[in-house]
Amino acid sequence: NAGVTQTPKFRILKIGQSMTLQCAQDMNHNYMYWYRQDPGMGLKLIYYSVGAGITDKGEVPNGYNVSRSTTEDFPLRLELAAPSQTSVYFCASSDQVGTSGYTDTQYFGPGTRLTVL
Amino acid sequence: GENVEQHPSTLSVQEGDSAVIKCTYSDSASNYFPWYKQELGKRPQLIIDIRSNVGEKKDQRIAVTLNKTAKHFSLHITETQPEDSAVYFCAASSTAGGTSYGKLTFGQGTILTVHP
């Protein structure tokens, strides 16, 4: 299993440009997440998905969009890049909440380092 | 929503000493508390987690304790080694009502430096 993969690893955008960050997992996980990590800070949730066709906003969704057409893929779209979106973006996945009701482990991808100039 | 505070922000110890990192959370419905280790330029890696039905969990040199009444949990690393140097993050998640969907709220991180 490759686990969670992300592309690209690095990207530099100009203000106003658009791009899609790709995320894929091969563990058949229902739950997928996008986080951003600003320098010296913890991770903040942007969007999440509980299955194909179902997405919802996290803590910091403004300026982003997502879609989930398959179980494996969860791309993150930036429509009009702004300097405030300079960050490292991590995608993660986990199995669904178990029958015990407890969250399952989240597995992270390697990240995409995005700079907006 | 949930808020997680983590202290200290930096921690420097000598090799062989113990290190303790503490986190507090605000949502009494939180019931899952993972700890992640992140090396420079790498992804966060889960090192240990605890669920609210236990008060302590240990894995070799790493242990986590949970105090639900006080709403805080701590990471304990014994016999520290230089390779333990990294940023450590705590997080909390709630499945209250079955609707949290595993969303994690992270602390701000602790930079641990272990000096040889």
Image (spheres, rainbow, N blue to C red):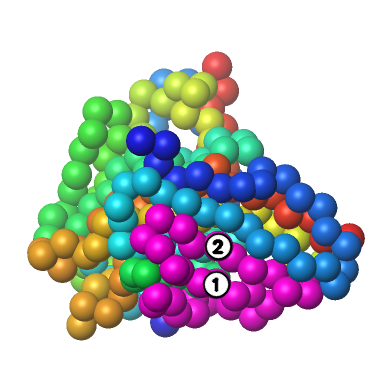
Residue at image x 72%, y 63%?
A19
Q: Are marks 1 and 2 in contact (CB under 8 Å)?
A: yes
Residue at the outermost front position: A69
Main secondary structure along the magenta-highlighted residues: loop
Q: Secondary structure at mark 1?
A: strand
B87 up-or-down from B34: above or below:
above
Percent position of residue B93, x then y = 33, 67
Percent position of residue A108, x then y = 45, 48
Q: Nearer the viewer, residue A52 or B68?
A: A52
> For the magenta stretch, what is the residue range?
A53-82
Residue at image x 60%, y 75%?
A65
The kind of residue tagged 1 is Val
B73 up-or-down from B24: above or below:
above
Q: Which mark is residue B106?
A: none
Residue at the outermost top position: B116
B110 up-or-down from B59: above or below:
below
Q: Quarter holding the C terminus of chain B?
A: top right
Percent position of residue B34, x then y = 33, 53
Residue at image x 65%, y 53%?
A88
Q: Quarter holding the N terminus of chain B?
A: bottom left
Q: Nearer the viewer, residue A49 or B35?
A: A49
A80 falls in the magenta region: yes
Parent chain of label 1: A
Parent chain of label 2: A
Residue at image x 15%, y 68%?
A101
- Give the residue number, with chain letter if any, for mark 1: A66
Q: Which mark is residue A75?
A: 2
Q: Residues within 10 Å of mark 1 (few under 14, many from 20)?
A: many
The answer for how far apart the CA atoms under marks 1 and 2 are is 6 Å
